[in-house]
Image (spheres, rainbow, N blue to C red):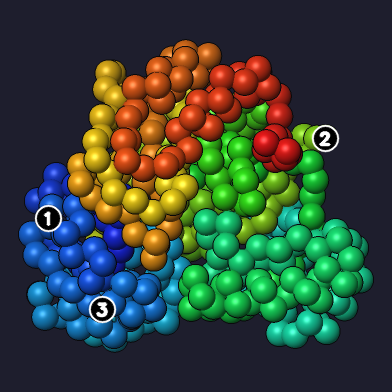
Amino acid sequence: MFSKILIANRGEIAVRIIRACKEMGIATVAVCSQADREALHTALADECCCVGGPAPADSYLNQERIVSAALAMGAQAIHPGYGFLSENPGFADLCRKNGLVFIGPSPESMLRLGDKALLKETMSAAGLPVIPGTGVLRTVSDALAAAETIGYPVMLKARAGGGGRGIRLAQSPEELTAAFPLAVAEGEAAFGDGAVYMEKYVHPARHIEVQILADEAGQVVCLGERDCYVQRRHQKLIEESPSPAVHPVQRARLMSLVSQAVEEVGYVGVGTLEFLLDQQGNFWFMEMNVRLQVEHGVTEMLTNIDLVKWQIRTAAGVPLNFAQADVRLAGAALECRINALAPGKLEMLHVPGGPFVRFDTYLVQGVTVSPYYDSLLGKLVVYAGTREEAVRKMKAALCELVMEGLETNIEEQLDIVSSQEFMSGAYDLTFMEGR
């Protein structure tokens, strides 16, 4: 096991990883930008190193400075969190060349799974129905030709995408021509990778993602599915597990197919396979995320399995000490993402409490929310024995959560979970249209 880990991230995920490391007896090194010198993750870590200016390209995306910091501080491994460098095979390779363990898949695995065309062939061969799409598109002409084959409407997606960035819907050749350079530029700015690919637009649908965990011995466990249907501009707002739209028989078959597919590709670590569930009850495989997901806490609350700790353990070669039969999927967990609507200073914070209520955040009283980074302030997660009880618990927690001095989406989240449509569970990705 590692004795010291550098966390190449910021915000709530850096705090989450540092806390997991403390519980495992692992020393931590935080990196920060000049804008984050007083951030919570820098105070909680055992050591801290400033790696550059406020812009992500000068700090959290600066691979050489992060690796240099890890070597100078004596870290053995680097945890990338999510976003930033978490799915960058070049960074994983740079870590390996410098004798550092990248806590995530190998660069070869990332490259193989990052090839969307090859991945879909592999998953199709393993029995997963795949959504029609392409590999990386180099030019607008390539995109136009592919769209003619697939049929409009289509979605352009950044290869290294996440958090709803680098995604554009095109309903015609004219829209596609305009959208292509925008998707490329957004991917380049957010992830340092401007490569994009295309998929058929399945609409209306629900967004279902299946969480897996695999070790070097080839054992794969599936930790159920999360429903991520409440989205605005492809940004997830609410997630829950299990999905109210998935029948237990469907779930058992889907989990079996996913486990088989992950075993065939030889994946190690935590990962998520994403699907669209159409109105006919068909699952369509879209992609595999080879990192920790923002919404991992939902699965943790449902299964009582610490994904961050197991991500670290599997990266160190530790085998899983439980099997699929040991995974508990009883009850219901629900997460609301709390976002800032504008930069500002937090004057007062009150966090809700009670059994099975969790708030993952980097906020402390007096902190200034920077305009340089993602608007996510924290993730409010609750668990209860039934979905109905979980929704009531979330309402109570949202009412108790107070962030004075910041403009947030707390009221909007309360309106959503209080709506009859949400409480019924009978809705899809069109839920936020017009809201």
Instruction: State the CA–CA distance, disc 3 to disc 1.
Output: 18 Å
Distance from disc 2 to disc 3, alpha carbons, whole Å, reads 50 Å
Sequence-wise first label, 3 or 1: 1
The number of callouts visible is 3
Packing grade of label 1 (10 A; few <14, some 14-19, many >=20) is few
Say which amino acid is labelled 3.
Gly
Q: Quadrant of the C terminus?
A: top right
Q: On the picture, is 168 further left or further right than 170?
A: left
Around disc 3, counting alpha carbons within 10 Å, would you say few (fewer than 14), some (14 to 19), or many (20 or more)? many
Whether residue 352 is visible, yes or no, is: yes
Residue placed at 53% from the left, 41% from the top?
A: 237
Residue denoted by label 1: 43
At label 2, which amino acid type do we have? Gln
Q: Which residue is mark 2?
A: 280
Nearer the observer, 406 or 78? 406
Label drawn at residue 124? none
Q: Secondary structure at mark 3?
A: strand
Q: Secondary structure at mark 2?
A: loop
Which circle's residue, 1 or 2, is located before the other in the chain?
1
Q: Give left or right: position of 362 versus 409.
A: left
Q: Give percent across and percent down for residue 387.
A: 52, 18
